Amino acid sequence: MSVEFSEQTHRNMIDRIPQTTGREVSDWLRTVDDGPSLVRFEEKVSWLRGAHELSYGQAKAIIHEYDLRRAARRLG
């Protein structure tokens, strides 16, 4: 079962990441960038959850933000 979040829900999750994890979003994005070269979204989410003890929602929001920013750089 896939859960789709609205853009507003995603923004709310991203805004809460520093409070709930103690690390800034930019730090998490560097962590993903420096992490293993995984291809699938769910693989990245699983790795982030396991390696950093994040909730599924936190990991999913971070990976989604990472993918959004990577896509923006490609178009930029």
Image (cartoon, rainbow, N blue to C red):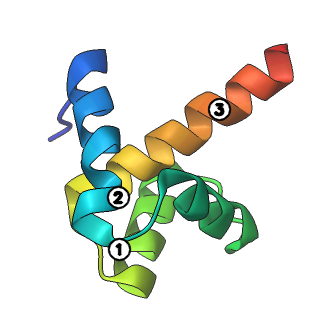
Which sits earlier in the primary sequence, circle 1 or circle 3? 1
Amino acid type at circle 2 is Pro
User: Could one spot residue 6 in this view of the protein?
Assistant: no
Residue 7 spot, x, y in % from top left: 31, 18
Q: Name the residue under label 1.
A: 49
Quadrant where the N terminus is found in the figure? top left
Element at label 1: helix
Q: Nearer the viewer, mark 1 or mark 3?
A: 3
Residue shown at 71% from the left, 61% from the top: 33
Rounded to the nearest angstrom, the CA distance separating label 1 from label 2 is 16 Å
Element at label 2: helix
Q: Name the residue under label 2.
A: 18
Q: Nearer the viewer, mark 1 or mark 2?
A: 2
Residue 55 spot, x, y in % from top left: 21, 67
Amino acid type at circle 1 is Arg
Rounded to the nearest angstrom, the CA distance separating label 1 from label 3 is 20 Å
